Structures are given as structure tokens and as C-alpha cells.
Amino acid sequence: MIKKINEAVAFIKSRYKEQPSVGIVLGSGLGSFVNEIETEAEISYKDIPHFPESTVEGHSGKLIFGNLGGKKVVAMAGRFHYYEGYTTQEVVFPIRVLKYLGIQTLVISNAAGGLNTSYKVGDLMIIKDHISMLTINPLLGKNESEFGPRFPDMSEPYKNRLIEKAKKIATENNIVINEGVYVGVTGPTFETRSEYKMLHLLGGDAVGMSTVQEVIAAVHLGLPVFAMSVITDVGIRDDENKITHEEVLQAAREAEPKLTLIFKQLIAQL
């Protein structure tokens, strides 16, 4: 694994010489965020040794390097999911590559289903914690001590100091923001109404098919993480709503300007 990471990093550095300090992972329907980056280089995933390729609509599949908020950043326009048939090692491979490229903070976005009955489509939720037991842990198997300890502490997977900065930015810009617990599931099916209710009873405020494995790998690597969900559907209600991927993408695009503002200002303050 370390050999593969080093080969991917060496290739990327042959195409882009600067060291990014912030890594950004963009979720479904949130790819327009890259337009905010003063782009200096783009590298397609298919060109990077050992990199998976994104197969999901709304994920363009490239690394974008440049400047944002006075910082050198690298954005993943497209992420990988267990439901695509990738192993957990492949899902988190890019996170490890970003760490070896030199990033010091990881900022993550995703589209999520609302479990909290007070949430509406288009709401933003800062992830303050997650429930990971319904996904496959990416650290299963022999531990690579170079990455981190055998048993990583998960008491603060999402850094409180970053959460407080984001909340202050939202308040200053009159953006209504929620804080909640994200439940990670494998997908690719959307949840049944009974599953939505169960996950809410377990303590979840939102549910999605990404992020959790990435965060576990990041924490293992010692990377501070900030993550935010766009609530793109609310499935816990007993009305006749049916969820489609197209509707999820549309809701994410409509909420994107608010998320973009918070991300930009947060990165500027790092």
C-alpha cells in the first residue's frame, strides 16, 4: 500500500510541484465548487497510478490544484464508494495520497438524507460525529504503523475548533446551519422508511453512503477533519415522497452557494 501511495504521489508531483495545505472532497452535485479555485493544474484519476475511477453521475473524476482563500488546495472532484465495488482500501486510497502530498487539513462535503424531522431539503448540517458500524471499516487487516496506531481514538473525529469557526462564519453571513450525527451506510439503495426511522432512533440526524470511511482513514493518519452535509431528501416522513438520484443532485446544486461560502471562508482562516 505504501509503495502504491508513493508511486501515485511521485506521479502527481511530476505534474504539480507545489504542496497543497488543504484537501477538499466534493460530494454528489457539489462539483461546481471547483469554479471557486484559482486552478493551476488538473489531473484525471485515470492517469494517476493505482487511483480508482469514479463511476457515479455528479462526480467528474479528477484532482484540481490551485489557490483558494490564500491557501494552496487540492480538490477531489469525485470520490469513491464501497457500493461501486471498490474495496475499502481503494475507497480511502486518495485520502492517504493527499496526506502524503502534504495536506494538513481535510474538508469534506456530501449529499445526505435527513433523519432529523426538523430538517428540510436544502438544509446544511455540520457533522459533529458519526455512526460507522453499518459500513466496513477501512482499517481492517494488518495495521500500517506508518499511517497510525492499531486502535485510533475516535472521540473527536471532526475537530471542534473547525466546527466553531464554521458556525461563526454561518452566523456572520446569516446562514442557518445545523449540527448533527451522520450515519454511514453502504448503499446503493436509498433507505426504506423503516430504516430511516431506525437510524434516527439510533441517534442519527442524516444518512449517507460516503464520508465515514474517508474520515476513519484521515483520523488514523492524524489529519484534522471538517465535514458538512447538504440535506438533499427527507425520507423519515410518512408522505409518499420517492427519492431519485437526479433529485438529490438538484437539491445539492441549489444549496451549494451556501456551502461554498462557508468552505471558502473556513479555508481562508486555517
Image: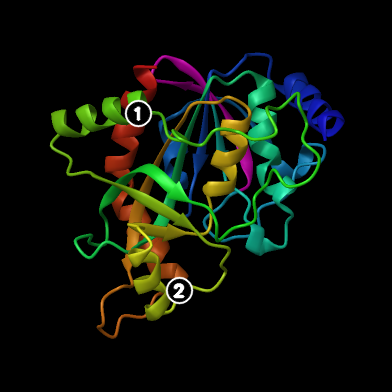
Q: Which mark is residue 48?
A: none
Using the rendered image of the protein, determine whether residue 66 is visible from the camera's viewpoint. yes
Which x, y percent locates residue 255? 29, 50
Most foreground residue, 90 or 13:
90
Q: Quadrant of residue 173?
A: top left
Image quadrant containing the C terminus: top left
Quadrant in the rendering for residue 241: bottom left
In the rendered image, residue 73, in percent from the top left (x then y), is placed at 52, 23
Decide whether residue 68 is among the magenta residues. yes
Sort mark 1 into few (<14), some (14-19) or many (20+) by Cα contacts within 10 Å: some
Q: Residue at x 26, y 82 (%)?
A: 238
**CB of mark 1 within 8 Å of CB of mark 2?**
no
Magenta-highlighted residues: 61-73
Q: Residue at x 22, y 28 (%)?
A: 169
Q: Is residue 22 above or below residue 202?
A: above
Q: Which residue is mark 2?
A: 191
- Which dot, 1 or 2, sits closer to the camera? 1
Amino acid carrying mark 1 in the image: Asn
Residue 44 appears in the figure: no
Instruction: Left or right? Give the position of 199 relative to 89.
Output: left
Label 2 is placed on what type of residue? Glu
Q: Main secondary structure of the magenta part?
A: strand
Tell me if residue 204 comes above or below residue 13 in the rendering.
below
Which residue is pictured at 68% across the width and 28% down the height? 149
Q: How many marks overall?
A: 2
Give the quadrant of the N terminus: top right
- Does the magenta segment cover residue 86? no
In the image: residue 173, left or right of residue 5: left
* Image coordinates for residue 249, horizontal then vertical, percent: 42, 61
x then y, percent, for residue 146 = 75, 23
